[in-house]
Image (cartoon, helix red, strand yellow):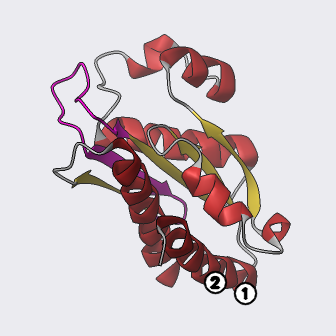
Amino acid sequence: MSDFETLSALAGRLAERLKASEQTVAVAESSAGGLISAALLAVPGASAYFLGGAVVYTGRARMRLLDIPREAVAGMRSASEPYALLLARTVREQFAADWGLSETGAAGPTGNGYGDAAGHSCLAVSGPFEHALTLETGDADRGANMFAFAGAALKLLLTATES
């Protein structure tokens, strides 16, 4: 099974759950580069649950796409759980979604300017409850990390919607 087929299978399970509960999601992703949104949109009937998404890869994108000012992230590292929660909350609020899902990290092949190694990602979900986690793949393969980050984000939301 290819990486995208794996993501599609996760997204399919998530789509069924979101549609059955009449819930919606909005996505803010960074190092996954749009793979989270692409997987969710690849499921037929995505308009029933997917409200929108943004690839928030830079500070400029964060300000333009999510309207999060520099002051709101003062003292916050971009590849951190607090930052991931901020993205998830903001995208949920801006789209009036039931769930906000976010990912931010360092895909590779090198780490980021904050000292995080390639394969580091922080993921968060915001909705009826919030949760953030950090993933360390230990891999420098950029493409593999992007798929790993997207898969972990989809699994996080799948777990959140079980509650």
User: Camera-side residue: 143 or 49?
Assistant: 143
Whether residue 163 is visible to the viewer of this picture, yes or no, is: no
Q: What residue is shown at x 22% (from left), y 29% (from top)? A: 111
Left or right: 40 as drawn, with respect to 82? right
What percent of the width, then of the height, locates residue 102? 49, 48
Q: Which residue is tagged 1?
A: 20
Q: What residue is shown at x 73% (from left), y 62% (from top)? A: 41
Residue that protrudes farthest toward the front in the picture: 2
Left or right: 23 as drawn, with respect to 48? left
* Label 2 secondary element: helix
Which amino acid is tagged 2?
Arg
What percent of the width, then of the height, locates residue 87? 50, 39
Q: What is the distance, in whole Å, between disc 2 and disc 1 at their CAs?
A: 5 Å
User: Looking at the rendering, which quadrant does residue 61 occupy?
Assistant: top right
What percent of the width, then of the height, locates residue 99? 60, 60
* Label 1 secondary element: helix
What percent of the width, then of the height, locates residue 56? 55, 31
**Neighbours of disc 2 within 10 Å: few (<14), some (14-19), many (20+):** some
Q: Is residue 162 above or below residue 155?
A: below
Q: Is residue 150 above or below residue 161?
A: above
User: Camera-side residue: 5 or 67?
Assistant: 5
Q: How many marks?
A: 2
Marks 2/1 in contact by CB < 8 Å: the verdict is: yes
Say whether residue 85 is magenta.
no
Which span of residues is magenta-colored? 105-129
Q: Is residue 88 above or below residue 36?
A: above
Whether residue 150 is visible to the viewer of this picture, yes or no, is: yes
Q: Is residue 63 above or below residue 1?
A: above
Say whether residue 117 is magenta.
yes
Q: Which residue is tagged 2?
A: 17
Which amino acid is tagged 1?
Ala
